[in-house]
Image (cartoon, rainbow, N blue to C red):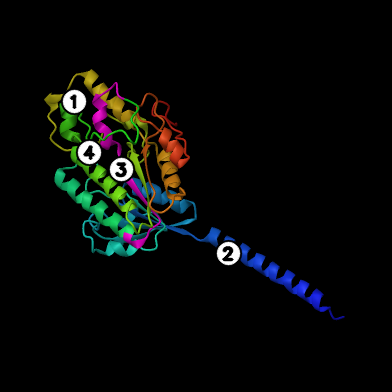
């Protein structure tokens, strides 16, 4: 039996609507299945390996690690990650090919990622950050995440009545240790912090450019030690033993109360592995418009600390779970 013209039109309309709905649903499923690509610099380092391992375990992210040939170690690369070798200090090196098309670039790389970095090392670390941030901005990468440092605010250690320390508190670069032997081994973090502050300021400039397409999340990272990162291994030196400068004189030890003050400061900037990953997850996923920038503190919820996490919670939507005074078993 043939259909009337009006019935045929109705049937055709219903079929078109169904097809259109099917196409929309298929596109949504495809969007959900599309794997994000995250580029991590300093990929064979402490933070780079932890984040890469975590992202790959989700099954939703492809990870490309950028590492300097001198520091590349195949046994440090998590299964499933791709690696691009290059020197970030060279703006024209092979690493640039990894940046276009990335959904996010996470910058951990530094020539010396510890407070005893010299001015020469810190100047080279500035080149790493500057070259990468400009390349990511020019390529239109959606998100740049910069692992800045608590040492940008380290001068407040010796102002015990000042607090809370928020992201808008004026910088006081460097953390001067009271114990002379610890200072000789670990440095004062001034050059190291200056490089981090310079990186922050460049991000601010790039976020304001007329052709901006990139948003920025800056995390002032606390002390996240290599490996298990248990609070019991924190010390007044502020640097793991294997990265301390050789030659601190044994006769330079300060009074015990001075050492205790330094150790309390470093314990209160502890960042657990779990909180580190929660913060980075949120920083990658955070919905920001192109050209927006957010700066937050990134420590665990340590009892007695002067670091404010109010802005961190408000911006990232994440509550720190761990406390150096009540560490996980």
Q: Earlier in the sequence, mark 2 or mark 4?
A: 2
Closer to the observer: label 2 or label 4? 2
Which region is colored magenta? 138-162
Judging by the rendered image, the residue that carries numbered circle 3 is 148
Label 3 secondary element: strand
State the CA–CA distance, disc 3 to disc 1. 25 Å
Compared to residue 135, the image places residue 262 above or below, namely: above
Residue in the foreground of this view, choosing between 197 and 179: 197
- Near mark 4 (Cα within 10 A), the count class, few <14, some 14-19 or many ≥20, is many
Residue 310 badge: none
Residue 27 badge: 2
User: Residue 298: within the magenta?
Assistant: no
Query: Residue 113: x and y, percent?
Result: 25, 44
Compared to residue 237, the image places residue 110 above or below, namely: below
Query: Residue 270: x and y, percent?
Result: 35, 33
Judging by the rendered image, the residue that carries numbered circle 4 is 115
State the CA–CA distance, disc 3 to disc 2. 38 Å
């Amino acid at each position: 039996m043939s259909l009337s013209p009006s019935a045929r039109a109705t049937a055709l309309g219903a079929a078109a609507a169904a097809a259109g709905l099917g196409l929309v649903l298929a596109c949504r499923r495809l969007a959900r299945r599309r794997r994000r690509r995250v580029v991590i610099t300093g990929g064979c380092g402490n933070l780079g390996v932890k984040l890469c391992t975590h992202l790959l375990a989700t099954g939703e992210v492809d990870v490309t690690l950028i590492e300097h040939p001198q520091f590349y170690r195949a046994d440090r690369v998590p299964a499933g990650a791709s690696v691009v070798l290059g020197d970030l200090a060279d703006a024209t090196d092979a690493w640039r090919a990894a940046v276009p098309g990335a959904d996010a670039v996470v910058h951990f790389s530094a020539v010396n990622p510890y407070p005893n970095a010299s001015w020469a090392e810190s100047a080279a670390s500035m080149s790493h950050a500057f070259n990468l941030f400009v390349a990511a901005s020019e390529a239109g990468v959606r998100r740049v995440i910069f692992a800045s440092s608590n040492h940008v605010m380290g001068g407040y250690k010796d102002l015990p009545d000042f607090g809370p320390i928020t992201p808008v508190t004026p910088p006081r670069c460097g953390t001067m240790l009271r114990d002379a032997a610890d200072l000789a081994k670990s440095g004062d973090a001034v050059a190291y912090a200056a490089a981090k502050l310079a990186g922050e300021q460049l991000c601010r400039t790039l976020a304001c450019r007329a052709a901006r397409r990139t948003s920025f999340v800056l995390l002032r990272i606390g002390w996240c030690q290599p490996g298990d990162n248990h609070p019991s291994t924190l010390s007044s030196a502020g640097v793991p033993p294997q990265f301390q400068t050789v030659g601190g004189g044994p006769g330079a030890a300060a009074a015990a109360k001075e050492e205790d003050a330094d150790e309390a400061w470093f314990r209160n900037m502890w960042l657990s592995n779990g909180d580190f990953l929660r913060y980075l997850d949120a920083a990658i996923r955070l919905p920001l418009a192109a050209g927006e920038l957010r700066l937050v503190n990134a420590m665990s919820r340590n009892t007695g600390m002067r670091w404010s996490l109010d802005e961190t919670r408000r911006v990232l939507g994440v509550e720190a779970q761990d406390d150096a005074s009540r560490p996980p078993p």
